[in-house]
Image (cartoon, rainbow, N blue to C red):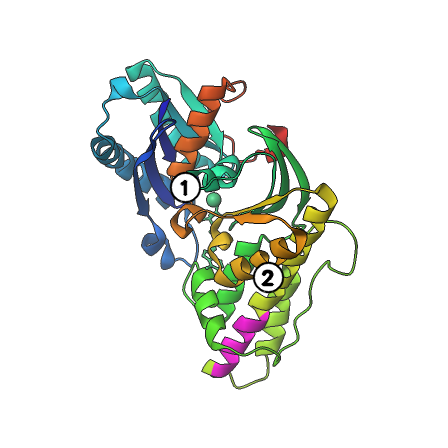
Amino acid sequence: MRVLGIESSCDETAVAVYDEARGLLAHRLHSQVAMHRAYGGVVPELASRDHVRRLLPLVREALAEAGSDPTSIDGIAYTAGPGLIGALLVGSGFAAALALAWGKPAIGIHHLEGHLLAPLLEPEPPAFPFLALLVSGGHTQLVDVAALGQYRILGETLDDAAGEAFDKTAKLLGLPYPGGAALASLAEQGSSGRFDFPRPMLDRPGLDFSFSGLKTAARMALRSRVIDDAVRADVARAFEEAVVDTLAEKCRRALRATGHARLVIAGGVGANRALRTRLLDIVRTCGARLYFPRPEFCTDNGAMIALAGAKRLAAGLLAGVGMGARANWELGAL
Ligand code: KG4
Ligand code: ZN
């Protein structure tokens, strides 16, 4: 199975070609971050228009890099949701047009399924079943993955997603949008112990998360104080440690509760080095193994969508993955 994958759910236009036998043949990405930065966040209408401009050239480049022409493509996978509806409609309309022109199936992929399968792009992929920690700008979930398409949500955030909390706190620290990675760099220069941030939801059982209080803690720490570089770095450090502690402890509980021997980490915050280091400790103490995609496949990309499409096509799992776009779509509903 050779599948063209298209991702356009937010502010990245990304295209890839994945082959079941040969692996990833090509991937191309255009990030709109610079365009949205002036507004401090993603402007949906600008995002949609830019996807329209970028998609066709990226598909041409990816096909050329893969040495593929339309006849050698078995299907067109695209992100059907969740995401910004206008941005999703560009990708789904484009995929539908290609499918019609080439006489191939269009396969609508759940964006989070793409993220949690992304470690399968790596040389030593995890086998099913596994526990997945999905940490992105829009979602924070612990998922019990029994097999392709069989997902049970064990816990999720009750308010902000982990990436959203990173971005909002980064904004308080004066870092440009999206500030997650910049906040992480700043935290490396800071020292522990100066600020005491809470560890939300750790004092009660269960696997849900809450991150909005940490943003408030950051605001309080910055209030009525001369804010120099050292204060900013120490606040970043305290914030990151609180997020990492919380995510790690919930992963430990979920590994114990499910008995899974594999933990997969995916989504943009999965690129965070402190989180990866801590989770390596956790899996060691639980007798499990940690799997994560390379950083460029943690954040939004077309490779994970092409891979998910190829796996679904190969397994004949195409029910409910037809044309269309859905802004809201629960992963558990798959
Ligand atoms: O998965 P993703 O690319 O997009 C969504 O589907 O949301 O995740 C983007 C999020 C942003 O909030 C960004 O700030 C965060 O991932 N992020 C990081 C790091 N790199 C990206 N957060 C913490 N540390 C990082 N190194
Ligand atoms: Zn994403």
Marked residue nearer the N-terminal end (2 or 1): 1
Q: Is residue 236 magenta?
A: yes
Vertical arrangement, residue 46 with respect to residue 284, above or below: above
- SS for callout 1: loop
Count of numbered badges drawn on the protein:
2
Q: Which residues are magenta?
A: 230-238
Which amino acid type is shown beneath numbered disc 1? Pro
Q: Residue at x 34, y 27 (%)?
A: 94
Query: Picture quarter containing residue 331?
Result: top right
Residue extending furthest toward the front: 287
Vertical arrangement, residue 285 with respect to residue 117, above or below: below
Across and down, in percent, residue 9 comes to 43, 39
Residue extending furthest toward the top: 103
Within 10 angstroms of label 2, few (less than 14), some, or many (20 or more) residues? many
Across and down, in percent, residue 76 comes to 37, 24
Give the numbered dot on residue 109. none
Q: Residue at x 46, y 31 (%)?
A: 308
User: Where the C terminus falls, by quadrant?
Assistant: top right
Q: Nearer the viewer, residue 78 or 263?
A: 263
Query: Picture quarter containing residue 65?
Result: top left
Q: Residue at x 59, y 67 (%)?
A: 241
Cβ of disc 1 within 8 Å of ligand 1?
Answer: no
Vertical arrangement, residue 169 with respect to residue 123, above or below: below
Q: Nearer the viewer, residue 260 or 203?
A: 260
Q: Is residue 114 magenta?
A: no
Give the numbered dot on residue 123. 1
Across and down, in percent, residue 238 comes to 59, 72
Spatial CA distance of label 2 from label 1 is 27 Å
Foreground mark, 2 or 1?
A: 1
Residue extending furthest toward the bottom: 226
Residue indicated by mark 2: 244
Judge from the rendering whether residue 82 lies leftward or rightward of residue 39; answer left or right: right
